[in-house]
Structures are given as structure tokens and as C-alpha cells.
Amino acid sequence: MLSVLGNPVYRKLFGAQVVALTGTGLATVALGLLAHDIAGPGSGAVLGTALAIKMVAYVGVAPVATALLGALPRRVVLIALDLVRVAVAAVLPWVDEVWQVYVLIFVLQAASAAFTPLFQATIPDVLPDEREYTRAVTLSRTAYDLEGLLSPALAAAALALVSFHELFLGTALGFAASALLVLSTVVPKPKSLPRRRCDAHGIRIYLATPRLRGLLAVHLAAAAAGSMVFVNTVAAVRDGLGRDASDVAVALAVNGAGSLAAALVLPSLLDRFTDRVVVSRAAVTLVAVLLVGAFAWSWQVLLVLWALIGAGCSLALTPGARLLRRSAGPADRPALFAADFALSHACWLACYPLAGWVATAAGMTTAFLVLGAVAAVGAVIAVRLWPAHDPAVVEHDHRDLDPHHEHLHDAVPVGGGWTHAHEFRIDDHHTRWP
């Protein structure tokens, strides 16, 4: 897995991801404590709303930003977006009103919504070999999981010396370091694409591909489970269990540890089982964990549940990048990554406020039951929409192409049309799944 770090461009981009994730992890802890400081027992509703605003930015900004920025020099765009995030993180320690939190979160996450799809779409260009790309995806997920483990631990240590406001300064430093690393490398130039490929075209490919429709339902199940962790940890630990701020960081670190453990075993699982088997079973596991959480509750139980949710989300979501790469050619890949970014975060947009509002109004038990039901719906839909037989090469007919079209060079005439087989993807020549 570490062999991909031999590529100097990827090594620097991976370093940028790591330092930015560390800063984001510190902000996750600090934002929850800021919400509790401003709103007290109502922090779940405040944090749920703040995270919903984050998802609004992700869903609304990602496709538009890809259309507007996709053809510009990627390095310049990525650095500029990092600098916007530095500025917002530096201002967050000074806010003392809920509305100020909401405004700054929207600006911060709008920049992230523009940054992330462009960054993700760059990696396949840097590592065109499928095996190397798979290793890079696994390594990126491992970094994400290590952040979930180490950033809360770092935050817990820092909170013993400083207030949570200083954690936002760590976030700013992380984004600044990311900008410097991107500045120091040569980022591949994007291909010149028709504008339609950078907006609705990606969503059309996504929704027309059966495996990706199933993946979207899995995103819903993972969002339901993850929302319990990201929205309700502060309220559950501080108000429900009466523990201190450092235990909030401990609970989040345990969630990250579960995610990391799953990421480490994932490559061997994908060697033995198909993506569909691993992902669907992980989604079912998340449903079971949420239902158990409704009927068993203590500090020790919370830690176990949070670890299992971390592991389940990691197993459910990490193979998604492989599916996206498999489902689009290089020309359509940036649009498809942006579509996945927007559609998956639409699931979080629904689940974040639901988790906060239900927990605040009806208690943690009801929140577990409601989100467990949402996760169950996602798991069932995923199994139904994602075909058990999902080969890469598919035999299919063409009846609307000129017989002399270059795409038909290996096709044979059958029943008034032309038939051939190749790695099938939705594109200009294949607008519907066979």
C-alpha cells in the first residue's frame, strides 16, 4: 500500500490531504464544544443545523464549482480554496452567536465542496494504473481513519492545556500546510471538457449506472449511522453521561479507531469478496448497531457502538472510489466525482438535522430508532438496486450509430443493429444500461 508514495506528485498530494484532515479533525471537536458553549443542552440541534448547512454547501456548490473551476489550473484553484479555509478557521474562535457559526460554516464548507472533487479527480490522473489507484484509495482512507483516531486524541491532549478556541488555530495551520504542499508540486492539467460534462452530465451517469444507484443507498445508511456520532456525541457524553470535554474527544477517537481497523483489513476482504458483498454487509451491520444502541446505553456501550459505526462506515464507503473509477472514463471522471460528492452529501444533509432534532426533542433512544429505520431503508434499497451479477465487460447492441462509426470497429451485425462487448460505461455512445 505504501509503494504508491514512491510517486513524488502523489506523495505531496497525500501529505496535503493528511495535514488538512488533521486540521479538520481538530475543528470537529472544537465545533461541537463551541456549540455546547453557546447553546448548552440544545447543542445537538445547533450542531445538527450547522452540519446541515455544511451539507447544503456540499450539495449545492460541488457541481457548480466543478463546472466553473474544472478547466482552470488545478494547482491555483486548490491553493486559493485552502487559503479561504485558513481565513475562516482563524475567525471561528472569536464568534459568540449561533448565526455567526452558521455563516462561517457555510463559507468554510463551500470552499471544501469546491476543493474535494477537484482533488479526488486529480489522483486517477497521477496514478493511472488501477492497482496503484486502488492502493492510493486505501491509503487515503487509512489517513482519514487515522485522523479520526489521532486528531481527537491530539485535541484531548491540547484541551488539558488550552481552551477549545485554540483548536481552530490548529485547523488554520493544517489548511495552510496543505496549500504549501500543493504549491510545491506539479498538478496534472485537466482535460478540456465540454461544459455539460462538469454539471448534470455527471449526475446522469451516476443515476443511470445500477451499481452507483446502489452505492447512493449505501451512502444513506452510512449517513444515518455517522450522524449519531458526529451530531450527538457531545450531548450524549456531556449531558447524557455527565462526563467532561476530554471524553468527547475520546469517544470520537474510538470511532476513528474502528474505522482504521476496518480500513486495514479492507484490501484483503476485497481480494476475497466483491465490492457489493463487502458494502452491503457493512450497511446491514450499521442497521444492527443502531438498533442495539436504542436499548443499551452506558459509557462502555457507547464506546463499543461508536467503534462499530466507524468500522461499518469505513467498509461501506471506502470501495466507492473504485466503483466511480470503474464507472467512467477519464473525460467524465471529474463530473462523476462531483456528482458522487453532491449526492452522497445530500444524504448527510437529511440525516444531520434529523439526528440533532430528534435527540433534542425526544431523546437518544428515539434518535437511535429513527436513524436505524433510515439506515435499514438504505440497506434494503442498495441490495435491490445493485445487481448481484455486475461484470465489467457487457455485451450490448447499438441501433442509433452510423455503421461506419469508429466505435463499431469490432461489432458484428445482428438483427438490424450492431453487437459487441467491452467494458461498459454510461457515456455519449451508451446512454442507457443494457
Image (cartoon, helix red, strand yellow):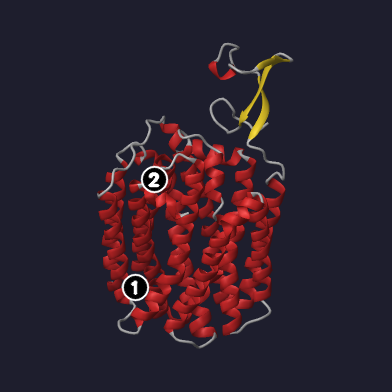
Q: Is mark 1 on a helix, strand or loop?
A: loop
Label 1: how many residues lie within 10 Å, few (<14), some (14-19) or many (20+)?
A: few
Q: Which residue lies furthest to the top in this view?
A: 404
Which label sits on residue 118? 2
x, y percent for residue 187: 32, 43
Front residue of 231 and 283:
283
User: Which residue occupies the foreground of this view, 362 or 266?
Assistant: 266
Q: Mark 1 points at which residue?
A: 97
- Amino acid identity at mark 2: Leu
Label 2 CA crowd tier, 10 Å (few <14, some 14–19, many 20+):
many
Q: Which labelled disc corresponds to residue 417?
A: none
Residue at 57% across / 33% down in the picture? 426
Q: Is residue 346 above or below residue 238?
A: above
Determine the secondary structure under disc 2.
Answer: helix
Q: Which amino acid does label 1 sit on?
A: Glu
Give the mark, 2 or 1, whose residue is nearer the N terminus.
1
The outermost residue toward the right is 415
Is residue 363 in view from this perspective? Answer: no
Q: Nearer the viewer, mark 2 or mark 1?
A: 2
User: Separation of disc 2 and disc 1 at Cα?
Assistant: 33 Å
Image x and y of residue 387, in percent: 70, 44
Q: Position of residue 341 (x, y in %)?
A: 48, 49
